[in-house]
Amino acid sequence: MSIEVISIIVLFASFFILLMLKVPVAYSIGISTTLSLLLNIDKLPGITTIAQRMTTGIDSFALLAIPFFVLAGEIMKRGGIANRLINFAKSLVASLPGGLAYVNVLASMLFGAISGSAIAATSAIGSIMTDRMEEEGYPREFSASVNITSSTTGLLIPPSNILIVYALASGGTASVAALFIAGYLPGILLGFAIMGYIAFVAITRKFVKGSRTPISIIWTYFRKAFFSLLLLVIVVGGIVAGIFTATEASAIAVLYAAVLALIYGDVRIKDFPEILLTSAKTTAVVMFLICTSMAMSWLFSFEGIPELISGFLLEQFSNKIVIFLVINLVLLIIGTFMDMTPAVLIFTPIFLPVVVALGMDPVHFGIVLVLNLCIGLCTPPVGTILFVGSGIANVSVSKVIKPLLPFLLIMVLVLLLITYIPEISMYLPTLFDL
């Protein structure tokens, strides 16, 4: 057995063992990469290669957008924006059977898109909607399931930090602007699919419906939410129109969110040190994950792992439909135990050459990859959104799993549609010539 094969075995075996021992993902990636590198030390300048690759891995102007979008999301979370979006959504759909569940989905889509964070959407919308839904007869575990799955739509609808990370991992073959505009239709489709299942449940269980909201009230709530919604137009419209880059847009989002929160009066100047500290902690975690993941990605290239996997899949399966299905299954499994950021950085270099060889556009694959990992956020054992949503609803994870399963099935069906109908993702980028 060659030293290269042994190195690959050590890399994957040590990584999965560390994960099973509940070592944090970033440390698991860094340690397993170092152990594998030690077996090739005679081919490299030294162990400092790891530190060099970690440093150069985050030396990217595009990554500056992440701390800014994190900060903008934190300001929005505290700035009263969630309540305004919920009231506007409620005025639109609360009169339908199961109306409050629709409100949960719409508010999560809007807030998740504005903040760019599924966790922020889960906590901000869930903390408000769960109690309201319980008062009208909705089981808390059902409310939690709606909140958990709908909050992932914000990772597809721009601006989205994970799409920025994918743009970096793709080596520039997929631009941030193209990814942002490509995420709209898949994100909206996912939200509507979840609402479709809610409609079925609402009719069969005879959920309560509210009274029809007068146009004047809808207009009032729209005016109150208008400046929050305008952020989406400014950020994404500016990027697509070429007025500013994604990084510049993220800084504009921070300034806009800060001014809006101060005008609303929900955030005061003295609150900003705490907001900055919280955002810095979140950014530090994300950036450390990116550092170690980029080091592992470099090692994959050094060992020729992407070429090996690409050659294996293309030799074993002659039908691209089957290959896409296999890749989806692998990514679904990966998403259950690995956080999105390292998963994108590690597996993009592995699978992107395969799908490109089969004619899939890198932008299309980015949307497929992110949706795969969105499903993983809602499933144990890692399931970040699952645990946050359950905690917000104050129900155990075991009680949430059963009502959550149909929603997960809906997400998988949408994933298959997006995988095999590229026009869903590529129509808008093609229309805007991105």
Image (spheres, rainbow, N blue to C red):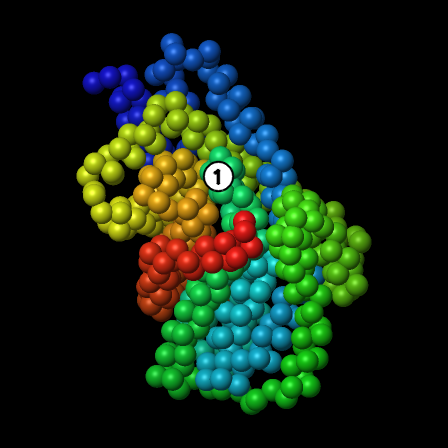
Q: Position of residue 120 (x, y in %)?
A: 57, 57
Examine the rendering and report whether any part of residue 69 can be seen: yes
Residue nearest the observer in this picture, 317 or 26:
317
The quarter holding residue 11 reads top left
Does 168 appear above or below 135?
A: above
Q: Position of residue 327 (x, y in %)?
A: 30, 46
Q: Residue at x 31, y 26 (%)?
A: 8
Left or right: 274, with 300 as reference point: right
The quarter holding residue 309 reads top left
Q: Looking at the rendering, in which quadrant would you find the N terminus? A: top left
Does 201 appear above or below 268?
A: below
Q: Residue at x 79, y 52 (%)?
A: 270
Examine the rendering and report whether any part of residue 281 can be seen: no
Q: Position of residue 75 (x, y in %)?
A: 68, 55
Which residue is disc 1 drawn over?
173
* Residue type, numbered disc 1: Thr
Q: Position of residue 398 (x, y in %)?
A: 35, 62
Residue nearest the observer in this picture, 121 or 69:
69
Q: Residues within 10 Å of mark 1 (few under 14, many from 20)?
A: some
